[in-house]
Amino acid sequence: MYITTHNISDFYRYESFRTVHTPLNPIEDLICWISGLNSTEYNSDILRKIHNFQDKTEIKESSKNITLFANNAIGLIEQAYSGPQEVSYLPLYYSILNLSKIYIITAGLRNKLTENRYHGAKYDPNQSHQKVTINEHIEIKLNGMLPLFYFILTGKNLYNITRKINLSEIYPYIPSISHEYSHALNEPSPIRQVQLHIHGGENNKFRIVANLYENDHPNAFDKKYLKLLSGFKSNSNGIIYTSKNIIAKNKDEARRKFISVLRTYLIYEPIINPSNSTIDSFLTPINNKRLLLPEEIPIWFTFFHLSNVVRYNPELLYKLKDTKYWPMLLALRKHTILRFLILFWSNFHRSHFCLYSG
């Protein structure tokens, strides 16, 4: 396994980027890395050096909690993959829940975990079904893990944005199953490829130039649906978007200033050129709802829903096995879990990781 950093994009979700090549199964590698959080010394170093924790008591308690939640998460993943596929969504959701708690700890909100013990969402197994679809909904609660997780990712209050989430508006925003989604629904995925670069320098003026790639989605070039580009202006054909100018001494200072206002949490997984491992573009959602969609949020909703279907509505689960959605749901088990593990590891280290075999 080795790391390369030969990338030409000016922006990632976090300030740095690491591409990791592995000859093994990437999920096994992520499980190995996260199992390493059993070391409180390692956790303490990360909290001090990367998350700027200062208080010794808080570092000690946070490190212990990280170890606990990481061990739970790994044990649940291993349990999920050692049993039947149909019920794996239940332990996989609880693995995601435990890793979400580590997000909250590293955000400095460990004290909020006690008062937000509940999920923060509710599933009603008695929703009516004229036919078997993924068109169920989840009710959002005022408090709990989901609203807290959403807050630390976006800075927004989820309960004030929406009280109900329809799953048909969530599944399309999971890139790791975009092929299966498009195949099952016969419609383009609402996720598009975009490239961001810093231009300028004359008179210390800099701007971001966003280049949009070709896309079949009907709203792919509509600014209202591109929340990452909020505040940008488009050219006549809508393919190039430009930010306002800022004043900076150099490109690095300009980048730091842009990061403070750019919604980098809407930067999804990167597009990698396998021939030279360079990154010059990434994915972002096409969405005009008030609900913001960092990549973790659709994954969280989806596994919360399916875990509740396993527990409270097994009849629906077994009906789904005979539908066009089943290949998509099966792909979630590993492709999407791998993606969440990478997102977690990236957040823990505040560096945009990309792990792939090669």
Image: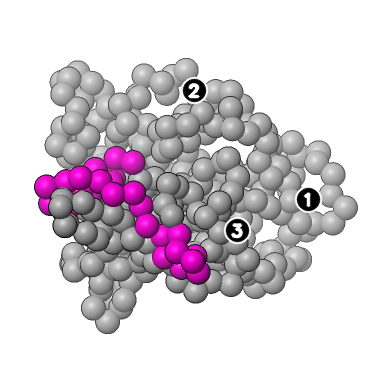
On screen, residue 50 versus residue 187, left or right, reads: left
Q: Which mark is residue 315?
A: 1
User: Type of residue at label 1?
Assistant: Glu
Residue farthest along the left direction in this orientation: 249
Residue carrying label 2 = 116
User: Type of residue at label 3?
Assistant: Pro
| Residue found at x 37% / y 61% | 210
Q: Is residue 252 magenta?
A: yes
Image height of 357 relative to 234, above or below: below
Between tags 1 and 2, which lies in front?
A: 2
On screen, residue 11 versus residue 186, left or right, reads: left
Between tags 2 and 3, which lies in front?
A: 3
**SS at badge 3:** helix
Image height of 84 relative to 166, above or below: below
| Residue found at x 33% / y 60% | 209
Q: Where does residue 190 sit, x and y in percent of width and height?
A: 57, 61
Q: CA distance from mark 2 to mark 3?
A: 28 Å
The span picked out in magenta is 234-261
| Residue found at x 41% / y 65% | 240
Q: Earlier in the sequence, mark 1 or mark 3?
A: 3
Q: Where does residue 66 sit, x and y in percent of width and height?
A: 30, 34
| Residue found at x 42% / y 32% | 155
Residue farthest along the bottom direction in this orientation: 275
Between tags 1 and 3, which lies in front?
A: 3
Residue carrying label 3 = 172
